[in-house]
Amino acid sequence: MSYFSLFHLKEEPFSNSPDPELYYQGPRHADCLHKLEIAIRLKRGLNVVLGDVGAGKTTMCRHLLRTLQSDDRVEAHLLLDPYFETPREFLAVVCRMLQPTGFEFDDTEWRLKERIKNALFRFGVDENKVVALIIDEGQKITVECLEALRELLNYETNNSKLLQIIIFAQTELKAVIDAKENFADRINELIEVKPLSRRETAKMIRHRLEAAKDTFKAPDLFTPAAIAAIHKATGGYPRKIMRLCHKALLLLARKREAKVTSAMVAECLKGDRRTRPNGRAWAYAALLLIALVLTGAVLYAMWRPQGSHDASAQAESRVVEDSVANEVEPPVHEALLTLEEDTDGDILSPPALSGHSVEPAVDVAVQDAQADEQDELGEWVVETEGTLEDLSRRIYGPLSSRALEGLLAANPQYEVGETLARGTRLVLPAFNESSFVPQHDEYMVHVATYPELVSAMQVAGTLVDSGWDAACMPVNREGEGTRFALVLMESFPDESSAHAAFAELPAENRGRARIIRGWDTGATVLAHAQDPVHLIPVR
């Protein structure tokens, strides 16, 4: 019997995709959406929604977009990733949204602003439409692009703004906003999204089962005690609730019982560091990682010396689909780092997705890697102008005070907000690195392999933003130099547990993902004990 027929469902009720059809509007979420829609229709200009990771901002964003796009009087556009190296790149994307034809990629910044202004006047004055730009992942916006956004708000008639901007962002954007008084003054509504209460958690679970039902009555699959345990374990964050409920239903299907109980929830929580910390598992993740780069770093330097960016290297920025780990099913192959070619193995996942070319913006100076303990990862040579915050995000992932403070301490000659010129050298601090050798018979999920660290880092950052712990591990293959294996930082005792994690990966990452087993004991890797995301060759 299939999963859906077993539970009388027509679709997955706890999908990790932001499906507006399954969206539960708790009182606070409904109030937020109501305020945003009123502000947009009254043409109030700029509105900002802040919330922690997994608080439901993206789903709320999609719901708002669908509501606006159903109205012919509204011209609504969505910007999923607002990180751009320069304001000109950002303006070019906005211009292409509003004016798809007649757009020139080599337009100057001034020309792009003129095109945007003309398009806004055409929509807002000539056609009497409301133009809305919705931005998700707003914490990625650079300070320079925030200034460009502020300037777009200057386009107005005598009584209203021509562009309505709604930014959904993590709470870290608040500090950036507070530091820019002229931007903060333009905000009409600043709303903070809070986690769900216990009652709201229960209503959301029941709502999603109701929306996904395949019968007249929604299935009653969770006991009250189970719902209470889910809320306690997740803190009321929707993304964590979805993940835990999905695992609970999988366990319920295996046990063939009537309802999920609190004991089943506790069983699902064992070893799940994303929902509740697991000391032993985290110790493994924090320990794995200083043995691989010490060897990989030297090879990285040999194959990619500082300053070399030839055409063939840039062409290699697309995703490389080699066999860092042999494919499973069946069987799961041994040794992640033996790199044996497996041309006949069964494909575990759907057909591979097309890789996205990522142009390296920086180079790493790899020097002597003999010290057992160190305070620095090496030097980062700036090739594209940016602030220290921009570079912190690029190196360490989503901007955090710990990473930024570490960079400032290691580079006291620079300040927050200061533009760093091309060629500037930065010392990269290491954060509580330690070594770890996992058990040979444990399973892990290998997401993909990349020829360049920058490409792997970017994908790892998107996974971390989605609630996953990921690491980029330098791996050497004879005749090909150093490559970077992106893996989930969680080991599993058996294949079925690894398959469950694989099934939860975002669809765009499952295309090349495989399950691996075992490690080469001579391999080394570097990670941050508190934030094992991006691995950088050591000095």
Image (tube, rainbow, N blue to C red):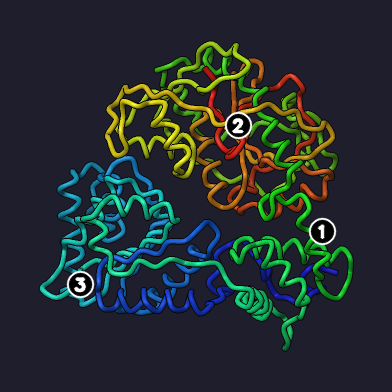
Question: Do the numbered discs 3 and 1 sit on residues whose CB atoms are within 8 Å?
Answer: no
Give me the C-alpha separation between circle 3 and circle 1.
56 Å
Which mark is on residue 527?
Answer: 2
Q: Is residue 481 left or right of residue 419?
A: right
What's under tag 2, amino acid-wise? Ala
Sort mark 2 into few (<14), some (14-19) or many (20+) by Cα contacts within 10 Å.
many
Mark 3 secondary-structure assignment: helix
Q: Nearer the viewer, residue 403 or 297?
A: 403
What's under tag 3, amino acid-wise? Gly
Q: Earlier in the sequence, mark 2 or mark 1?
A: 1
Locate residue 207: give its quadrant.
Answer: bottom right
Residue name at image x 20 percent, y 72 percent: 124
Q: Nearer the viewer, residue 502 or 281?
A: 281
User: In the rendered image of this protein, does residue 533 appear above or below residue 351?
Assistant: above
Mark 2 secondary-structure assignment: loop
Residue name at image x 84 percent, y 35 percent: 441
Identify the residue under disc 3: 124
Residue 111, given in percent of the width and then of the height, sits at 16, 49
Identify the residue under disc 1: 267
Mark 1 secondary-structure assignment: helix
Residue 490, given in percent of the width and then of the height, sits at 71, 42
Which mark is on residue 109?
Answer: none
Residue 435, given in percent of the width and then of the height, sits at 68, 26
Residue name at image x 44 percent, y 43 percent: 399
User: In the rendered image of this protein, does residue 253 appear above or below residue 303?
Assistant: below
Sort mark 1 into few (<14), some (14-19) or many (20+) by Cα contacts within 10 Å.
some
